[in-house]
C-alpha cells in the first residue's frame, strides 16, 4: 500500500504529467456531460419509459454501450465516435487501392495531415448518412417521445448530430495532443466503462434473487478474471527475433557486436481490427433503420451468423492492419543500414521474406484468438449471464478496456522512468498495444 501511495505521489510531482491528467479528466467530463444533453423536441421522460420496456441487449445495446448510454437517450452525442471510425476504415482502404492516397501515405507528416483532413470531411458525410437512420430507429421504438416531426426539426437534428460527432472527434484529438493516451480510444473506453457498474449490480441482484445464488456469481467473476488475463497475454505477447550487430571501432571505443531482438507482436494490429469490424457491422443496421426494417441477422448480436461474420471480419482486418503497421522491407533496410543481421539469414530481401513469414505465422493464431475473444459474449449470454454483463466477458468491450488501460499506464510509466522514478510495477515493464515494437534497438 505504501508503494502505491508513493507511486501516486511521484505521478503528481511531475508537472507535465499532472497537467496532462487534469486536461484528460476535464475533456472526459465534458464528453460525459454532453452525452446527457437531449436533442430538442424530444420528451426525455416518454423516451426513458419506452426504452426501459424494450429489450436493449442486442445490437442496439452494443451501440448504446459504445456511446456511453447517449444512443438510447437521443443525445446530441448519440452517434458517438463510430462515424469517425467508419471514415478511417474507408480512407485506409482507399490507401490500399488508390494511387493518390498511397502517395499521400508516403509523404510523411504533410501526407498524414492531408489524410486526417480527408477523414474529417468524410466523417461529416458518414454522420449525415447515419443520422436519419438513427433518428428513425429511436422514433420507431418511442414515437410518443417526439413532439415535433417537421422538416425543419429533421434538418436541425441531423445538423446537431453531425456537430456532436465532430465535437467528440475534436475532444479525442485534444486528448491525444494535450492529455494521456489515444483520445479516440479513450473516449470509446469511457463510454464502455460507464456501463460496467450498472451491469455488475444487475447480474449480482439477479443471482441473489434465486437465479443461481452467490456461488454461481463468484464462478462468473473467476471466469471473467481468466478472460482478462488471456486478453492481456494477447495484447502483450511477442515473438522475439534475434538480431546481431557488427562490431564498429571508433577511436578507442567499440560499438555493436551484441545481440538484440526485434519483438514482433502476436497481435500487432492491437484492438483496431475489432473496432473496424464492429463499425462495418453497424452499417447494415443504420441502413435498415433508415428504411424502417429490422436489419436481419445484423440485429441479432448473439446469433450464429452475426458472430460468424464478425469473426471472419476480425481475422481479415487483423491481416490488413498488420500489413499496414509492419513493413518487413523497411525493417530489413533499417537493419542492413545499421549493420545488423538475423543469424542464418542473408541481409536484404531474404531478411524481409523471413520477417514476413514469421509475421504471417504469428498473426494467424493471434487473429483467431482475437476473434474468439470477440464472440465470447455470445457464449456468456447463452449460459444465462445477462446481456449487459456478458459484454464484458470479451468482445469489443474487454479488448478496448485492456488495450487502452495498458497504453495509458505505459505512457505514465514512461514519464516516471524518464524522471528517474521507479515504474508502476516492482518488476517488469508495462507494454502497451500501441508501442512501436517494430524498431530495432541497437546496443
Image (spheres, rainbow, N blue to C red):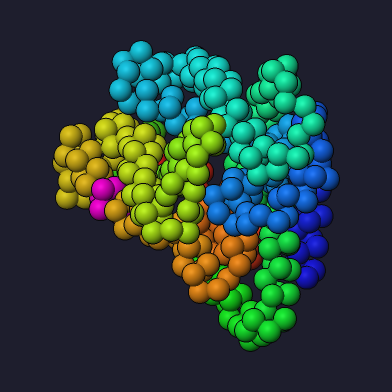
How many numbered discs, if any? 0
Which quarter of the figure has residue 224? Answer: bottom right
In the shown orientation, is residue 275 left or right of residue 135? left
Image quarter (top left, top right, bottom left or bottom right) of the C terminus? top left
Q: Looking at the image, which is closer to me, 436 or 101?
A: 101
The image shows residue 204 at horizontal and vertical percentages of 70, 74
Tell me if residue 195 comes above or below residue 439 in the rendering: below
Above or below residue 409? Residue 101 is above
Q: Which secondary structure type mostly characterizes the magenta part of the structure?
A: helix
Identity of the residue drawn at 68% across and 84% down: 210
Where is residue 77? Give x, y as percent: 70, 34
| Relative height, residue 186 to residue 205 (above, below) | above
Q: Which residues are magenta?
A: 358-362
Residue in the picture at 80% in, 69% down: 2
Visible residue check, residue 221: yes
* Extreme residue in the front direction: 144
> Quadrant of the image for the N terminus?
bottom right
Instruction: Tell me what residue is drawn at x 46 percent, y 67 percent.
Output: 379
Pick the residue in front: 346 or 357: 357
Let me know if residue 360 is in the magenta part: yes
The quadrant where residue 245 appears: top left
Look at the image and tell me whether residue 437 can be seen: no
Q: Is residue 299 magenta?
A: no
Amino acid at each position: 500500500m505504501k508503494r502505491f501511495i508513493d507511486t501516486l505521489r511521484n505521478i503528481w510531482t511531475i508537472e507535465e504529467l499532472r497537467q496532462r491528467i487534469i486536461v484528460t479528466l476535464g475533456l472526459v467530463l465534458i464528453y460525459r456531460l454532453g452525452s446527457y444533453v437531449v436533442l430538442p423536441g424530444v420528451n426525455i421522460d416518454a423516451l426513458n419509459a419506452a426504452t426501459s420496456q424494450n429489450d436493449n441487449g442486442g445490437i442496439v445495446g452494443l451501440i448504446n454501450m459504445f456511446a456511453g448510454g447517449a444512443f438510447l437517450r437521443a443525445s446530441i452525442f448519440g452517434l458517438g465516435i463510430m462515424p469517425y471510425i467508419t471514415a478511417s476504415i474507408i480512407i485506409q482502404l482507399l490507401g490500399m487501392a488508390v494511387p493518390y492516397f498511397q502517395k499521400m501515405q508516403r509523404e510523411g507528416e504533410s501526407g498524414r495531415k492531408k489524410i486526417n483532413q480527408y477523414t474529417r470531411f468524410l466523417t461529416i458525410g458518414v454522420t449525415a448518412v447515419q443520422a436519419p437512420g438513427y433518428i428513425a430507429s429511436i422514433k420507431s421504438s418511442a414515437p410518443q417521445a417526439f413532439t415535433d416531426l417537421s422538416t425543419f426539426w429533421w434538418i436541425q437534428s441531423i445538423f446537431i448530430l453531425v456537430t456532436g460527432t465532430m465535437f467528440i472527434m475534436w475532444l479525442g484529438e485534444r486528448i491525444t495532443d494535450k492529455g494521456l493516451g489515444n483520445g479516440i480510444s479513450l473516449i470509446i473506453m469511457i463510454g464502455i466503462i460507464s456501463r460496467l457498474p450498472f451491469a455488475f449490480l444487475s447480474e449480482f441482484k439477479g443471482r441473489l434473487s434465486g437465479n443461481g445464488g452467490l456461488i454461481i456469481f463468484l464462478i462468473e467473476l473467476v471466469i471473467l478474471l481468466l478472460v482478462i488475463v488471456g486478453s492481456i497475454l494477447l495484447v502483450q505477447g511477442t515473438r522475439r527475433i534475434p538480431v546481431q550487430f557488427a562490431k564498429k571501432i571508433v577511436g578507442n571505443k567499440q560499438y555493436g557486436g551484441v545481440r538484440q531482438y526485434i519483438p514482433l507482436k502476436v497481435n500487432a494490429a492491437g484492438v483496431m481490427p475489432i473496432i473496424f469490424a464492429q463499425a462495418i457491422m453497424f452499417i447494415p443496421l443504420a441502413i435498415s433503420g433508415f428504411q424502417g426494417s429490422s436489419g436481419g441477422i445484423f440485429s441479432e448480436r448473439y446469433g450464429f451468423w452475426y458472430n460468424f461474420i464478425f469473426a471472419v471480419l476480425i481475422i481479415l482486418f487483423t491481416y490488413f492492419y498488420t500489413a499496414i503497421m509492419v513493413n518487413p522491407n523497411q525493417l530489413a533496410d533499417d537493419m542492413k543500414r545499421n549493420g545488423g543481421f538475423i543469424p542464418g539469414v542473408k541481409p536484404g530481401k531474404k531478411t524481409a521474406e523471413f520477417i514476413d513469414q514469421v509475421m504471417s505465422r504469428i498473426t494467424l493464431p493471434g487473429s483467431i484468438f482475437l476473434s474468439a475473444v470477440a464472440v465470447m459474449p455470445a457464449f456468456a449470454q447463452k449460459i444465462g449471464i445477462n446481456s449487459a454483463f456478458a459484454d464484458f466477458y470479451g468482445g469489443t468491450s474487454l479488448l478496448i478496456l485492456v488495450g487502452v488501460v495498458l497504453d495509458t499506464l505505459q505512457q505514465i510509466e514512461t514519464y516516471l522512468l524518464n524522471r528517474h522514478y521507479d515504474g508502476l510495477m516492482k518488476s517488469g515493464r508495462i507494454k502497451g498495444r500501441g508501442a512501436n515494437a517494430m524498431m530495432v534497438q541497437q546496443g
